[in-house]
């Protein structure tokens, strides 16, 4: 499914010079990142660790974009000395630090500026990034003066403009507005000493988690942003994560207990919970849940919960679930993005194993963490 989704998104932009930089943060399992590279993707890394994953997966520095708020000195040194395709700078202070590091290492760093266009992505407030109250990027005006400043620094090359207004964006209108803002800014540099190579519209394309949820399609997305990008004539970069891998993953848990609530509702208690998938607890996100092998019988009104000592450790509330028994397997859908990558060892629960399924074969790509491994860092 990852293959077909990657190609569908890539095909939607086939009429215009573009490159998909897969957002490693969505799912950073090396085998999966390597697969995306084989399909032709480039990479978007959000930390020194993700740059290392990209390299382990076979990406060369020219294919890696380094993005993210709050890059450390060590991470900037790593990116500058590698010579990544672009560092998406988030502030004037960061630009100055990149310039100093590049000068000290005798390098010219390729830098893009992340703008904050003050556009409401319309997604959950925890994953919206494009408003001025959000910590991400700089205003259009600040970007303009930052870029003039960068053009004067010999250790920097201004290569692009970047924008990412949020994740799980389900309508095309905010994406179009962000593209317009970035295109206007790019065009304002025509004839100046700034030779931009690309505009990077970030990620954010949403998926349908709920059965009748309507979301923008790749074709709508392309139709919404390409008119603006065409005006610039620059190469388009995108940083998609969720859209490619989200629907391709399921979290499989086992029912460990059933408990009746007052009334007719049941608690279905699974061995998987918020330490494996935090999205329901963190964003009140909805994920489809169903038994792997449904049993006959009338459905049961259920809260599907995990084993962690937190009331928010709920995978799904008030669901109509086919009958299950202790030992049955449950599948939680659409967990390929922001699932395993956001897992924790809370309650000293080891990280789950990960398996890739390709038609009727499966391969272990990440083994289960052992309790001993979990304690290895305790000195
Ligand atoms: N580029 C940048 C700069 C980003 O910050 C992100 C996601 C992406 C690309 C990829 O966005 P996507 O295409 O996956 O929407 N944990 C949250 C999502 C956080 C997204 C963070 N940034 C969730 O589970 O919904």
Image (spheres, rainbow, N blue to C red):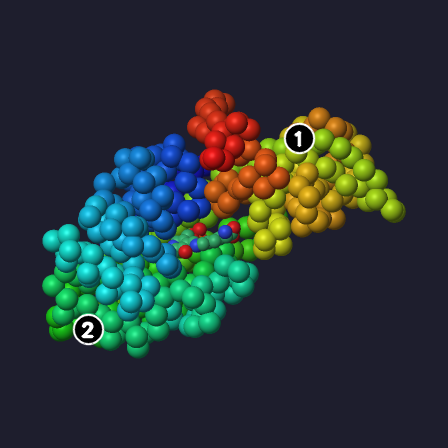
What residue appears at the point 25 percent right and 64 percent down from the top-left corner? 95
Q: Residue 354: percent from the left, percent from the top?
A: 49, 31
Q: Nearer the viewer, residue 152 or 329?
A: 152
What residue appears at the point 81 percent right and 37 percent down from the top-left corner? 259
For label 2, count other residues whose C-alpha is less than 10 Å away and answer few (under 14), some (14-19) or many (20+): some
Work out whether 219 lies above or below 322.
below
Question: Is the C-beta separation of discs 1 and 2 under 8 Å?
Answer: no
What residue appears at the point 49 percent right and 56 percent down from the top-left corner? 168
Residue 133 seen in this snapshot? yes
**Residue 254: mark in rendering:** 1
Q: Residue 284: percent from the left, percent from the top?
A: 62, 54
Q: Earlier in the sequence, mark 1 or mark 2?
A: 2
Q: Secondary structure at mark 1?
A: strand
Please indicate whether residue 50 sits to the left or right of residue 277 in the image.
Answer: left
Q: Residue 204, located in which quarter of the rendered image?
A: bottom left
Q: Residue 188: percent from the left, percent from the top?
A: 22, 75
**Residue 8: mark in rendering:** none
What residue appears at the point 29 percent right and 50 percent down from the top-left corner? 74
Residue position marked by numbered label 2 in the rendering? 148
Quadrant in which the N terminus appears:
top left
Q: Residue 218: percent from the left, percent from the top?
A: 41, 52
Work out whether 356 lies above or below 335.
above
Please indicate whether residue 271 sits to the left or right of residue 296 in the image.
Answer: left
- Alpha carbon of mark 1 to alpha carbon of mark 2: how far? 58 Å
């Amino acid at each position: 499914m990852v293959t077909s989704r990657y190609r569908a998104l890539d095909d939607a932009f086939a009429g215009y010079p573009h490159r998909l930089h897969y957002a490693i943060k969505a799912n950073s399992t090396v085998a999966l990142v390597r697969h995306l590279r084989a399909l032709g993707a480039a990479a978007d890394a959000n930390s020194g660790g993700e740059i290392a994953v990209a390299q382990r997966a076979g990406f060369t520095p020219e294919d890696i974009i380094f993005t993210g708020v709050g890059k450390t000195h060590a991470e900037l040194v790593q990116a500058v000395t590698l010579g990544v395709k672009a560092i998406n700078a988030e502030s004037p202070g960061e630009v100055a630090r990149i310039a100093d590091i590049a000068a000290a290492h005798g390098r010219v760093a390729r830098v893009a500026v992340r703008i904050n266009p003050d556009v409401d992505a319309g997604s959950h407030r925890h994953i919206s990034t494009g408003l001025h109250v959000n910590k991400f990027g700089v205003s259009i005006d600040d970007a303009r003066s930052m870029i003039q400043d960068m053009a004067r620094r010999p250790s920097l090359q201004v290569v692009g403009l970047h924008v990412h207004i949020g994740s799980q964006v389900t309508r095309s209108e905010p994406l179009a507005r962000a593209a317009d803002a970035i295109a206007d800014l790019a065009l304002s540099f025509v004839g100046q000493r700034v030779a931009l190579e690309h505009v990077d519209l970030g990620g954010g394309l949403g998926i349908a988690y709920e059965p009748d949820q309507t979301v923008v399609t790749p074709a709508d997305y392309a139709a919404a942003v390409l008119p603006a990008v065409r005006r610039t004539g620059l190469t388009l970069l995108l940083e998609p994560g969720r859209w490619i891998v989200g629907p391709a993953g399921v979290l499989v848990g086992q029912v460990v207990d059933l408990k009746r609530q007052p009334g007719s509702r049941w608690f279905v208690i699974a061995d998987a919970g918020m330490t494996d998938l935090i999205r329901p607890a963190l964003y009140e996100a909805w994920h489809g849940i169903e038994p792997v092998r449904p049993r006959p019988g009338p459905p049961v009104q259920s809260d599907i919960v995990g084993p962690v000592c937190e009331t928010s450790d709920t995978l799904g509330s008030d669901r109509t679930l086919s009958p299950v028994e202790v030992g049955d397997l449950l599948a939680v859908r659409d967990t390929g993005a922001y699932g395993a990558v956001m897992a924790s060892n809370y309650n000293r629960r080891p990280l789950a194993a990960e398996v890739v399924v390709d038609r009727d074969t499966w391969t272990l790509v990440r083994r289960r963490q052992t309790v001993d491994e979990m304690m290895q860092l305790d000195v």
